[in-house]
Image: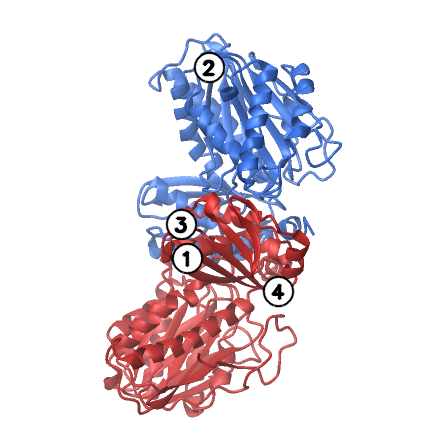
Chain colours: A blue, B red
Amino acid sequence: MTTITRLLPRTPRANAGPLAPTEGATALPVIDGVRLSAVEAGVRYSGRLDVMLAEICAGASIAGVFTKSSTRSAPVLMCQEHLAKFDGSAGTAAILVNSGNSNAFTGKNGFDATQTLAERTAAALGCPATHVFPASTGVIGEPLPHERITAKLDELVSTLSPDAGADAAAAIMTTDTYVKGAFCTVDLGAEVTISGFAKGSGMIAPDMATMLVYIFTDAEIAQPVLQDILSEHNQRTFNAITVDGDTSTSDSLVIAATGRAGNDRIESRDDPRAEQFADALHAVMLDLAHQVVRDGEGATKFVAVNVTGAASDTSAHKVGLSIANSPLVKTAIAGEDPNWGRIVMAIGKSGEPADRDALTIRFGHMLVAENGWRARDYREEDAAALMKQPEIEINVDMGIGGGQATVWTCDLTHDYISINADYRS
Amino acid sequence: MTTITRLLPRTPRANAGPLAPTEGATALPVIDGVRLSAVEAGVRYSGRLDVMLAEICAGASIAGVFTKSSTRSAPVLMCQEHLAKFDGSAGTAAILVNSGNSNAFTGKNGFDATQTLAERTAAALGCPATHVFPASTGVIGEPLPHERITAKLDELVSTLSPDAGADAAAAIMTTDTYVKGAFCTVDLGAEVTISGFAKGSGMIAPDMATMLVYIFTDAEIAQPVLQDILSEHNQRTFNAITVDGDTSTSDSLVIAATGRAGNDRIESRDDPRAEQFADALHAVMLDLAHQVVRDGEGATKFVAVNVTGAASDTSAHKVGLSIANSPLVKTAIAGEDPNWGRIVMAIGKSGEPADRDALTIRFGHMLVAENGWRARDYREEDAAALMKQPEIEINVDMGIGGGQATVWTCDLTHDYISINADYRS
């Protein structure tokens, strides 16, 4: 069992959501081979950190997963291109992220702006431009004022420091009500540290709330193994959370492994240390994913939907998402209403194999429905008391197979409407 | 062009939504061969009509379409079974609908209750039990107090009348803020009347807001032709609307054609009068579908999403639904915010073929985005003025093919949350 430590803000925000972490550390650990910095560039707002730079030593392995949107942004397309031909031995690498403007759907100008930023960053750091991994998050369709960022490149480079993780995590925030970081150590012969930070509050709001995740580790691990582990565990962590079912044009997750920990290099998934590393990485990813859901726009409840007994794992995942994305289920949870009929509805509409009479539904351990009807001993007042908790567990057994999956979500509240309907008006 | 007349309530409700019809008739036309009645049975609430009965003359053709939910209700399953073997020449037929309780997910007791209702109705009318088409709408998972309905069967039968359409339409309402009816005439050699009524306010709320539609016509038309026309036009009317993307366990649409108009019997889709009839039926179905969207829970805006230039009609339909179901698009519309970036996002997440640089987006005639960027002459203040209208048109040309579809929806407002989060608490 991996012990995860969460990042806490040095100064808690007054508007932090009710599900914000209350225990943790106010700094992220140093990862040998990684230096970070953050500045106020005024991309859109003034008086806050809004650009962060990470410098990753030569020889690192880098892997990533990105949004599948067909309208993805210029920075995402560049990251995918750079990742496909990345060779850590060719020099240092960099991650450059701005908040306030997503540079998405900005046509050729947007590509040019991203290209300029990559070239100028590479020049400032003395690395190949193809080693720069950019990201932008914020309003869609507005020209990125990239000169405000390049004007700060010298400051970003000169202030690079091994222990600026918390500032970097703060610089990428948009509608987030708290900073999101998580780290752990794992013994792979040598002690290896894995440390990550994330932003995201709606699953996406193109104005403001794309999900970005950066994870750093000193593990020595071959790139193909790192990519394989990342892709596999992304499916059960970041791909298993939903706030509103909307998918960003900019969602990005990048991991860099510097290889400085001194462990024997992991060259294959068959190496038992690969699974130890994967387990620890999974724990960091899952914790960050949960922090994103807990900061879901307007969220007051953290909801786990466990689906078992489905036709397949994929089918269980789809049933879970159908429940977790249902506005009627999510509004019932917001209202602390144990309206299990809406769960039946959401299972039915998923299009996945289901047998009404084989279904079992529980809230936590409480049996709610089975054999095609409400359970004999179900008492709505007990269920209503359970719904008052800030963490809700919906357990659905489909009763037809061995497939299982868990999906996490939050409730749908008046504040979600306020944040998203009233923001620009 | 078919002229549609809408049904207006004799006494307007104080809580009628802002998009309720303001012009129309306070009665539905008589359809020769159809008699209707409605009573207060107190299924769940007292002091309102909550059960309706329709008697359809022997010799009628009956067709229907039903929810595809895998957890559909006992009445839906019975309707599908009865429809499959229906033979109008064997006697009169009946439709029996209650509001207040959906009899869905009620196990064997639910099936028994539906069977009892069908048998008792058949006995009271002197028709085969397999000629009864039941529906129930309201709370899920509660035993249907069917004895309250059977206690009223004598009254329902003795008050059957050709001109009780408006009462029947009122009896099936749940969270609807206004009664929904529409009718027209079409000259098929003889004058044929088509008259329907509907209920539905959320696309579904298992508590209250399933969609039910009943249409009556005196046209003489063979059952297979009627079913074929109904299924085809359902795709572009009721299957092209969405309030919240949730699908009822009880959605039902039944049409009965009595054959009393005196037109030459339509035996095939190749008969040109089949298309005349289809056009008129389409107009009634579309109008009822629009009335359902206009009464969407909390709706303040009626939104048409037209998608052209897609890879196929099916692809256009999916892109349209992705836009129409996006909480971020719907909250932006609620906030009168011309946030076209969210439309780009919703196109991107649809999973359908798209080329970012070939996309064209318009609000009504106003060009918003093209060539991968905001249009040169786009002015946000003009778009913001346009968003203040109660009816919004989003026109998306995918620029890659000939597929097209239109989807209708409403905005997502604080009132949707209030209706669905606070209802049972």
Say which label, 3 or 1, has the lower sequence index.
1
At numbered mark 1, what does the secondary structure look like: helix, strand or loop? Answer: helix
Label 4–label 3 contact, CB within 8 A = no
Viewer-nearest of discs 2 and 4: 2
Q: Chain of mark 2?
A: A
Residue A184 shown left or right of residue B94 in the figure: right
Can you say whether B9 is above or below B405 in the image?
A: below
Residue B5 x/y as whole percent:
50, 82
Q: Position of residue B325 (x, y in %)?
A: 50, 55
In the image, what residue occupies the spot 50% across and 70% down? B290
The amino acid marked with disc number 2 is Gly
Tell me which corner region of the image, top left, top right, bottom left or bottom right, holds residue B45. bottom right
Question: Residue flagged by tag 1: what amino acid is it?
Answer: His
Real-space Cα separation, disc 2 to disc 1, in angstroms: 45 Å
Q: CA distance from mark 4 to mark 1?
A: 24 Å
Q: Nearer the viewer, mark 3 or mark 1?
A: 3
Does the CB distance between marks 2 and 3 fall below 8 Å?
no
Q: Amino acid at mark 3?
A: Ile
Label 4 neighbourhood size at 10 Å, few (<14), some (14-19), many (20+)? many
Closer to us: A128 or A181: A128
Which badge, 4 or 1, is on the more N-terminal residue? Answer: 4
The chain letter under disc 3 is B
Label 2, on which residue? A88
Q: Which mark is residue B317?
A: 1
Q: Residue at x 55, y 65 (%)?
A: B296
Foreground residue among B325 and A41: A41
Quadrant assignment, res B256: bottom left
Q: Quadrant of residue B313?
A: bottom left
